[in-house]
Image (tube, rainbow, N blue to C red):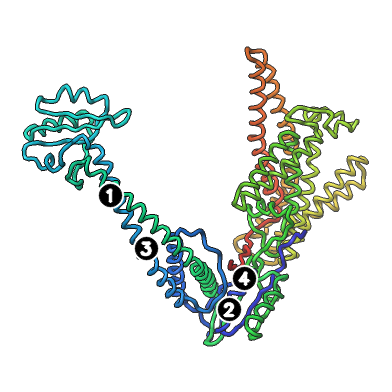
Amino acid sequence: MSFSPAPMRRLRMVVLDRDARRVTAVLGRLGVMHLLEARVEDVPESLRRVNRNEDLERCRALLGRIENLRDRLGLAALPAPGPDGEEPLDRAEARVTEMEARLKPVLARREALASESERLQDEHARLSSLTFLDAPLTRVVDSPFLYLFVGSIPEADVAAVRAEARADVVLIEMPLDARRRQLAALTPRRGRFALDTLLRRNNFTPEDLAGLPMGVPAQLLPEIEKRLAEIRAQQEEAGREMQALAEELRPTLVEWHGRLRLELAVLEASANFAHTDSACLMDGWAPSAAVPAVIRKTLEATGGRAVILAHTPEEAGAPSAEVPVLLRNNRFFRPFELLVTTYGLPRYRDVDPTLIVGLSFLLMYGLMFGDVGHGALLALAGAGLWRFMKDRALRDLGVIVLWAGAASVLCGFLYGSLFGIDVEALSVLAHVGSLHWEGPLSQPMYLLTAPILIGVFMVAAGMTANLANRVRNGDASGGLLDRFGGMGLVFYAAALLITAAAWRFGGGRWVWIAAAVFLAGPLLVLFLKEIVHRVLHPSKDEGLAMAAVNGAFEVMETLMSFLTNTVSFSRVGAFALAHGGLSLAVYTLAEIVRGAPGGVLWGAAAVALGNLLILALEGLIVFVQCMRLEYYEFFSKFFEGGGKRYSPFRVG
């Protein structure tokens, strides 16, 4: 376990232009090189950037055509980038065009059959509703004397149409479904407008007869059914032909899809490189442990025709904010990186606080929400989130919730709490005779004061991390003189030791002498720091008087922040008391409702719903409070963020 990100090396490689593509593919398969863009202002005039936009667009278009072929052939997702190849775009375009030509007639045949089938099915459905007409449709539709309305009408409106229809109207009805009837209405042409008005007023939905064969409906149906059967057979044959073609073309699709995916990745990466007429400059960062493999593979790919320089960030003169950061934590603590990176990413030379965050978060969460039953349910919820979520951040959150639940279970055994019920047999503290422990509510002052020790550790750890960050980033004097650095550590440690000694042994002259030296001394340094700076660096905007005011405010802010930051951790005990109080309220309510009719059921419901409310509401609030203590009382002492995330170039 390390408190620092993985050490990085700046790699600058010069290879022949003819080897550049091969080396880029090798780097992509290694997946460890964080590529840097070659900025024109940073390279000699003899170097230039090469515009790959045309090849990129061409490669993306070919990939789109291959994926369209895959979808048309009904193939599953194709594999990731496959074997390497040299400049495959011209050959890929020829092969893709050839496959599209093979597929085109098969698709055209399937689409023609599908279109004819859809048309015939529509005709069949529409003619089926007209079988009551035992005459060719053309006699009725084209009749100069009669007008035919065909459609459907709600069952409830049929009676009104019958009652209001004129004597020269013929109505033919057939059941359509439970709520509507099929209706044909025949009238002389002179009465069509009156009949149309009547039907519309009664929610009639007309059916368009245009496009239907004009023969006798009952005689047309068998012919349509026969043709539909022939089409189904032809569609099955076309399906077999498509399946055979898919099996034949799949290896070629897989090969060229892989080659083009690789080519696309290489083209995108190569946009970062600088070129001469015959050479290529590649620049990037890699973890120190991976540098030997990068050098070895590059030399193998080029036959030794490469110049490779590896420098530490200090040798390369790289600021901390420009070096990519790869946090290195073991499997247990890695999910807690989510809590750190949500606030910000540490810079390369800064302390990685993941270890302290993971341990302190679990300790505080367990103490705030210590309950065997609630913790076990919380752990199960976290396990489900980790098991069934696909997003990595949600899976990491699930692991954190799982371990937070486990911490709650352990502290539940410490308190002797099971679903808010104090069980003396479970409690570890109940066996410490001097405590007289009967549950969290029996020792409120103990719960409020004991967590302050956690606060002492967190505040001191934050100042230590700040001092380390300042020293690592070349600001040792600033770290020593900072109120959250060396001076603050001296003052804070002295205040704790003197307070403990005075409480244990009583006051005395030596206590006041120690207070004057170790407490007043750091405060005096903080006060004089601004004044000395103004003496050495005069400013028209801010004189010595303002510097003295600033120094005084810094002393006051230091005193207040150390006190409030430390005492703030008493909320850990306060939430443990709140958990006991809420649980007591739930079981008291359950006792009250047991006296009502059906009281046993009401009491059980009150206990179940109350515990679910505690689990959901308090579990979330405690999570937020733990994060607040981490961010405001710990991170605020040292964490600046601003790190660059390590994003290696990967293929596959």
Residue 483 in the image: x percent, y percent? 74, 55
Left or right side of 51 for 129: left
Q: Where in the figure is residue 516, as x and y percent of width and height?
A: 85, 50
Residue beneath disc 1: 119
Numbered mark located on residue 106 in the image = 3
CA distance separating discs 1 and 2: 55 Å
Question: Which numbered disc, 4 or 1, marks the residue that appears first in the sequence?
Answer: 4
Tell me which amino acid carries mark 3: Val
Contact check, label 3 and label 1, Cβ < 8 Å = no
Element type where label 1 sits in the image: helix
Picture coordinates of residue 308, whole percent (x, y): 66, 81
Q: Position of residue 519 (x, y in %)?
A: 82, 51
Circles 1, 2 touching at the beta carbon (< 8 Å): no
Report the residue marked by disc 2: 22
Secondary structure type for disc 3: helix
Q: CA distance from mark 4 to mark 1?
A: 53 Å
Q: Earlier in the sequence, mark 4 or mark 2?
A: 2
Of badges 4 and 1, the one in the foreground is 1
What separation in Å lies between label 3 and label 1 (alpha carbons)?
20 Å
Between marks 4 and 3 in the image, the one whose residue lies nearer the viewer: 3
As shown in the figure, which amino acid type bears the numbered disc 4? Answer: Arg
Three-letter code for the amino acid on which mark 1 is drawn: Arg
The part of the image, by quadrant, that contains residue 563 is top right
- The residue indicated by pointer 4 is 29
CA–CA distance in space, label 2 to label 3:
39 Å
490 left or right of 95 in image: right
Q: Which kind of residue does numbered mark 2 sit on?
A: Arg
Residue positioned 43% across, 68% down in the render:
61
Q: Crowding near pointer 1: few (<14 within 10 Å), some, many (20+)?
A: few
Q: Is residue 72 above or below residue 386?
A: below
Give the position of the N terminus as an image quadrant: bottom right
Residue contact at pointers 2 and 3, CB within 8 angstroms: no
